[in-house]
Image: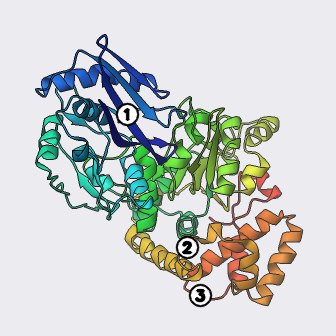
Amino acid sequence: MLAAIRSAAVLGIDAYDVTVEVDVANGLPQWFIVGLPANAVKESRERVSAALINAGFDVPSRRITVNLAPADIRKEGTAFDLPIALGVLVGTGVLKPEQVQQCLVVGELGLDASIRPVRGALSIARKLSSSGGAKGSVLILPAANVAEASLVRDVRLGAPSSLGELVGWLMRGTIPPPVIAPRVHADDDLLDLADVAGQEGAKRALAIAAAGSHGILLVGPPGAGKTMLARRLPAILPSLTDAEALEVTAVHSVAGMLDAASGSVIRRPFRAPHHSISTAGLVGGGSSPRPGEVSLAHHGVLFLDELLEFPRSVLEALRQPMEDGTVTIARASASLKFPARFALAAAMNPCPCGHSGSTLPCVCPAADVVKYRARLSGPLADRIDLHVYVPPVALSRLSARDTSARSVDVRANVERARLCQRERYKGDGTCNARAAGRWLETHGDLESGARALLTSAGERLHLSARAFHRVLRVARTISDLDGIRTISTAQIAEALGYRPRAADTSDGGSRRHE
């Protein structure tokens, strides 16, 4: 007897429909799984057989053929265990075809017939909703995946704890809705910007970076507080919108990195990989392409501490996703796209010994300093909006706490600036860092004096066209942060101060933000 069970699989971060066809026929007792199954899928026959027996069902001593259609796409993961088991039960007459007709089924089976979580449940729920199949259908999935799938509100869910429980529901014709725990959003564990002594200029730059989703590079000697400042960036980032939270959660679900308790990402991501990371680990890839750190930082921040310790080839891989907001992984069988709209935050020393431009003498030969700084290429540096020098802090100030720069207050100001941007760009998710430069020149409320200053300064500083528009975007963010409708010469001058200059190479970075 032939059975067909609706299921789904994930390719990249998007899901596609899969039909699990199970044919139980006379012949020697053996299993065949076809349809380009990966090893984890081939091993499902052992898990399914043990689960059926431990759930109290007989495994027929017949020829069982499982086809995963479409057969020209390679199938990965363990999500087909549950639909295969249901197909066997339909093929042996335990269940009737009409009892599973309206179900889309995913889930991994344990040998004890328990149902275990799978990756990409949110993407599967979104696919069911977008394809118009949500009406009249029910998505059967593991209980541990309910929290993320419930973010798609128009999809009916069923979350049995075991194969036996699911079969009982199908026989009775009733699938009870799962219990969804309320999501808790707490910021108590976030670090406070007020803990950082001094560094008013760097704190101001961090607020600008958070308000407009700009990239920021902190340059300074060891112990100046660069990492401490960057680690407090999450506390001032604006809240995720519903659409952004859905996208971020989908990426983390595919990567298998969701918290089972919350089932969703409730804060903007802050990813901080070690400098030993590979190019594939940073931008994604592998034989079965997975999202990299740039995609896991989607709608959040990617922090690279000790920037120049990263291999140059790894850093150069950032250029395309920083510009396009996506990563394309090309393979012979398919080309996959992962979202990567992140803001880069980085920290580095000005020289190998770290003391160039500080109060302590630099012992590095000039050639070593040039070679060290050359690890950051000009094109990549040009894509970073804010270059900030972080000077040493006087020891007498270490015991003081800057209550004027509490994270909660800075974040409130950042939220107001983001609200201005949502209104300006009609709520399409664009922020100032992603706005079209030409659009801002025409519609960005740029005063004539500010335009003249930007043009003349750009010519003196030999700014590229990209850098010219990045200065304009930063100035627009500064105006939003200060609650000013127009961009005046004051905002342009401050934004120009965050650009790297050739003269800065002699003292380790810009000293104008101390």
Residue type at mark 1: give it: Glu
Distance CA(mark 2)–CA(mark 3): 22 Å
Q: How many marks?
A: 3
* Labelled pair 3, 1 in contact (Cβ < 8 Å): no
Where, by quadrant of the figure, is residue 150 drawn?
A: bottom left
Label 1 sits on residue: 21
Residue type at mark 3: give it: Ile
Q: Does the rendering let one see residue 275?
A: no
In the picture provided, is 115 more to the left or to the right than 462? left
Where, by quadrant of the figure, is residue 368 drawn?
A: top right
Residue type at mark 2: give it: Asp
If you read the primary sequence from the N terminus, does the residue marked by circle 2 or circle 3 appear first?
2
- Along the line of sight, which residue is nearer the eye, 112 or 424? 112
Label 3 sits on residue: 484
Label 2 sits on residue: 428
Q: Does the rendering let one see residue 308?
A: yes
Residue name at image x 44 percent, y 66 percent: 243
x and y, in percent, of residue 152 in the image: 35, 61
If you read the primary sequence from the N terminus, does the residue marked by circle 2 or circle 1 appear first?
1
x and y, in percent, of residue 28 in the image: 31, 10
